[in-house]
Image (cartoon, helix red, strand yellow):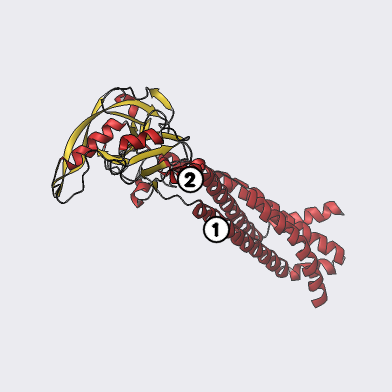
Amino acid sequence: MMKSNLFLATRTTLRNKKTIILILLISTILLLGTIISTYQKSVTEHISKYSNSIYENLMYTVGKPNSKYKENEKVLSEIEHIRFISPEYDIGTFSLYNDEWQSKYTDGNIWINVANNNTIPKITKGNKFPKDDDYYLICPEILYANSSINSSKDIYHIRKKDGIDMSKYLDKYINFKEEVIIDEEIGEKEINAKIIGLYKVDKYLSTDNICYSNANLRRKTYDMYYEDANLEVYEYVKNPNSALIIIDNYNNHDEVVNKLSELGYHVEAYAEYDPNTLKDLNNNSKIFSIIILIICIVLITIFLLRNTLSRKEEFKIYHYLGYTSSNIIILNIISNLIIMFASLILSLLLSLIYKYVLKTIIYNYPFFFNKMEVMLSIRSLLLIFIIAATWSVVCSVINSLLIRIKR
């Protein structure tokens, strides 16, 4: 009898056009579960890796009234976790331009962080900074020369082929242009710097447009910027007394700042980093995901209820043919489970297609999702399926009984 129920339920379910449409609808909702859980997992992973890895978050301006830089340098060098100390030349980052690196979707600009051999990324090709007075850069293996690759809407157009293979520039001098002040207008000056090393950009960081310079290059660009400026209008200090420091890890932020405060230093973070903001972002994504999950489960439940009610006349015929109420309930349960399992299989196939589409987009347009790594997850899909399938069994019993009562 069980085999005949299964055969009948399968035949009547899969031959019904409305049921096929229902399977397509439910599989689409289950696919939404994949999208939700993939988004949630990707955001969580991105936040956990992103927060402590941004170089600018490790930079601080440190100063004390009536103190000289040399005095400050001596004191700062004895504080644990400080990996870099230099005069504070305006800011710790600056930009240079190379018109040869410009393309249809990139503007030829790169950002540069001042660094030393204690703070540079791991070198994959080339060498670290030597101890001389030349101007050096350490750049990504594949450089995207664009002034912004994490905030501008234009980044969605940047293609993989816009990336520059920097290995062909290794150990060569490159002619750059820097924006400078001439009197009170913006102009340009040229400077040569040698690409001495390459590093691999972490896959979750949007630093593909960032090179690292030695302190000599930063000092030179700072002087060039004000060289022809009207110094009565612009503040320019040839030998700053404040220091720029870079610490080894953001987890040591409180320890370093407290120590500096005890010594009477004023500390100003170069980039504001608020862990609570990232926590709020993570919590908001979880709340959003839960709300969508509930909506998905409710929709599937409604679809299954309507499907059962629409088969009222069919169940009556079964009853006239000698099927008992228990047989009809079992038929309805089997029919709904067939719908759910068919939807599950189709949604899994759609999830694979979804993954392939995302991978294709990211491969061709690496900044389309702001370097957030897409981590496929079907956790929510399975959760929706299990809850909806269990609830469909309960609904099948209730609705079959209601149909019998109304008959």
Q: Which residue is mark 2?
A: 258
Residue 6 rendering spot, x and y as whole percentages? 80, 53
Tell which residue pokes out farthest to the front in this image: 66
Question: Given the image, on which type of amino acid does mark 1 rest?
Answer: Asn
**Residue drawn at (74%, 54%), measured in percent from left and top?**
10
Q: Which mark is residue 284?
A: 1
Quarter of the figure that contains the C terminus: bottom right
- Helix, strand or loop at mark 2: helix
Question: Given the image, on which type of amino acid does mark 2 rest?
Answer: Asn
Tell which residue pokes out farthest to the bottom in this image: 406
* Of the image marks 2 and 1, the number of the one nearer the N terminus: 2
* Circle 2 or circle 1, nearest the eye: 2
Which one is nearer the viewer's eye here, 179 or 183?
183
Q: Residues within 10 Å of mark 2 (few under 14, many from 20)?
A: few
Count the numbered circles shown.
2
Residue 181 seen in the figure: yes
Name which quarter of the figure residue 179 lies in.
top left
Q: Residues within 10 Å of mark 1 (few under 14, many from 20)?
A: few
Which one is nearer the viewer's eye here, 233 or 295?
233
Residue 212 rendering spot, x and y as whole percentages? 34, 33
